Image: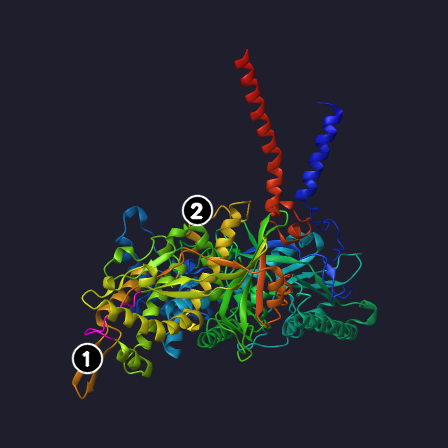
Amino acid sequence: MTIRACSRLASVLLLVLALVGLPGPAPVRADPGNKSWDLPGEDLFAMDLDKGPASAGQDYSYEVLRAEDLAIPDWMLKIDYLAVLPSHEVYKGKKGEKNARLQAAYKEYVKRMTDEEAKKPEAERAPPVSLTDFFRSFYPGGWNHFLTAWRDYQRKKGVKAYDEYKVKYLEVLNINPRGAAYEGYFNGENHVDEDHNFSVINGKVDGVELNVKGKNGKPKAYRLDGYRVKANGAPGWNIVLELKSGWHVDWEQIKDVLIHVCVETNSDLVLGFGEFPDVHDAGSLEKFKKDIAALRDLERDLLAKRQAKWGAANVGTRAVYPRYFGGVGKAVEFGTDKPVRIGELSAGAQQNFPSEASRDVAKSPKSQAQDEDDKAIEEGFRAEFEDPPEEVNAPPECSLGRSPCHPSQVSTRALASSIYNGDEMGVGAEEPLGGVDFSTLELRYISDTFLGAPGVKYAYSVDPDPKQKVSYGGAEAAKLAADSFFTWLALPESAFTVNLNPEEPDRIVDAQFGRTDAGRVLLEADFQMKKTVAKLIHPDTKGGRRFWDELRGEERCISMREWIVPTPATVRNDGNELFILDAPLDVKMETEYKKLSGDDNCPGQATADTQHNEAVYRAEILPQVVKAVNTAPEYADLRRVYASRVAAQWYRERSATKATAYGDIVDSGDITPWVTTTGWKPRDTFDAYVKSYKEGEFRVEHTSREGNVIYTNTYVYGGVDFTATPTSNLPEPAFTAAHPGLRDAVSDLAGAPAADGAGEFWFGAETNELTYDEAHRLPASPLANPLFYAAGALPLLIWVLAGVRLIRRRSRSRVVR
């Protein structure tokens, strides 16, 4: 190869690297040999808070408990077994394992456990746990602690569904992992260890007690994230370190714990924050700025108290150091690296970049009643954890599913040292979002991106509702929208239809589609449509009576077989992004949907009478059914999954022309991550429908001058057909005029919900295979544009054509010779 050729090759390589983007520099860690331990992160006192920090920080993961991790055997849920268990606070007693009721319960446990295991093949049998492990299972997080807490809650408050109580119990336990993981991330990156004279990590300072006493009469327990003693000859003072994975300042903890310890140990207070509020969210940013300003005032107060105790000569001029050390927490399932996704449009290797908006969705309560009940449960745990025993040992690893011990993550997370701490139990956390109606949440914006690696930007639209002080149901609605999007990608389009036909129980729904929430929603909507019709034609209503009076024929036969189908969705598709502006649904009657004649539907009745009856139905009933499908609350889930269907179809078609983040999911047939967790099965809806079909939604007997007139309605069947998703693309000028402010609302998806010109809110986020910093510091890649592939293929096409032409010439040349 010549020097000129090498130079050209190098130039080409440099050009490719410039297009694709180079990775950024590796993060710089603190020098472990630096005894002075220079404070890590950015100084929030010196930062321009209106602009925010220089970066979002690195990613770190934390494990959370799932319902499967508390998979207690059915025999332990029996009332007679629960009755023999002692109080779930038995671990606080002085007698410990010697407690008489505990020992009696252990004997009962051993007997029942042995009997249950005897039913299994010998190779699969597990022995009972020891008395010590049985006792430890009453610590918070242990199986018996959960079981007895549920038992006692039922006695006080009445029956609460076991699964619902379990969910809340796990939520309380899952408050800690993110904070604990951030502490590990911070400590690891900054070498917080004895090399820097940290004598306390996740503990208390010996000899320093709080002034406040607990119910047991002893000083309340506390835990410091870190305590550093100044090295001999090193500058500075002792340090009390407190870390927060978020950006909220916990004033209760600062005033009740940290200030007292700082004064008693003559220490500076270092506050590390893992997040910064969205600079575009005026409310959150203003609150944070006020907190930082208040910390300046706190510094003066702390200095004065330390000077009074230790003398001015022994105290420096600064005492509070708020630092931003960014970190993006990623929740993963325990024992796996699978991310926990609630309403996030991420799958596979894609990481979701959390935003204020996405967190507002995720933390929305399910309902008002459940929210009040959940708060009562949480407060009960908080009160219980206020006064821990003097020594709490986390349960050891046990055989999950075979013993009453908690899974092994308890010991790895040091539950005992973190759960007994008020600030870790959610004190000072934000209240759930209000002012919007999450029942209207739909996936209405998606953009295919390439920030160093393929990614996605997306946003859910939500209608405002100022009357809602707390907005409910956001997490469930977003999960349904996201799961449906991936379901529509993974399965073939031919699977997207359902049909409730009492004569064909084996053809209700595609087998795979019937395992998803999207399939459940379509079937339930089909059944709901029949109930809607029944309500509209009920003879005891004014409209229903008029409808029946206008029908003709001796039997007044009419086919009301109907299908819910899409009508063209109005979208703005500019190639790289899709706005779904309107996605209406229609209801088609069988004669129109299947092109049947009147004779096919009502044999034996005059065709003219059948056509008349259908015309009456079309004029008086059908428009009301269509309106209900498009506006009524009971069809909100159907509208939600259909919006996701439109988004998925656009993404499916785009993936056929270029590499996308989820291109490998298209037509994969694998819906494992999105299988419904509700326990629903298609046969459930089918059986309910058959019951309605056989018994009728109503049987009305009217008495008139002609005698008794009995109206009997035998229900009809139809379906929902989403195999097609017709769209109408709105030109850019019309889009801008009709939807002012919409592009601005989705332009920055890292912050709080944004409102468009019509007052609708957009809750967005984005995903990428890279970390946030890696993705956003790279230049935009031409790989996002399908024309790039066409341009790249053009030279190859020319080369192929030239080769074919050359071969033909040589062939002709041989023939001539």
- Tell me if label 1 and label 2 are in contact, CB under 8 Å: no
How many numbered marks does the figure carry?
A: 2
Of helix, strand and loop, which one carries label 2? loop
Amino acid on which disc 2 is placed: Ser
- Direction from residue 93 to residue 37 in the image, left or right: right
Q: Which residue is mark 2?
A: 668
Asked if residue 107 can be seen in this view, the reply is no
Asked if residue 527 can be seen in this view, the reply is yes
Query: Residue 229: which quarter of the image?
Result: bottom right
Which residue reaches farthest top?
817
Counting from the top left corner in percent of width and height, residue 436 is at 54, 73
Principal secondary structure, stretch drawn in magenta = loop
| Frontmost residue, 315 versus 216 | 315
| Frontmost residue, 745 versus 552 | 552
Counting from the top left corner in percent of width and height, residue 258 is at 67, 70
Question: The N terminus lies in which quarter of the figure?
Answer: top right
In this rendering, the answer to whether 192 lies above or below 560 is above
Check disc 1: other Cα within 10 Å, few if <14, some if 14-19, many if 20+.
few
Query: Residue 657: which quarter of the image?
Result: top right
Check disc 2: other Cα within 10 Å, few if <14, some if 14-19, many if 20+.
few
- Direction from residue 316 to residue 25 in the image, left or right: left
- Direction from residue 505 to residue 479 in the image, left or right: right
Counting from the top left corner in percent of width and height, residue 469 is at 54, 78
Of helix, strand and loop, which one carries label 1? strand
Q: Which residue is mark 1?
A: 710
In this rendering, the answer to whether 560 lies above or below 667 is below
Which region shows up in magenta? Answer: 552-561
Question: The C terminus lies in which quarter of the figure?
Answer: top right
Magenta stretch holds residue 558? yes
Query: Residue 89: which quarter of the image?
Result: bottom left
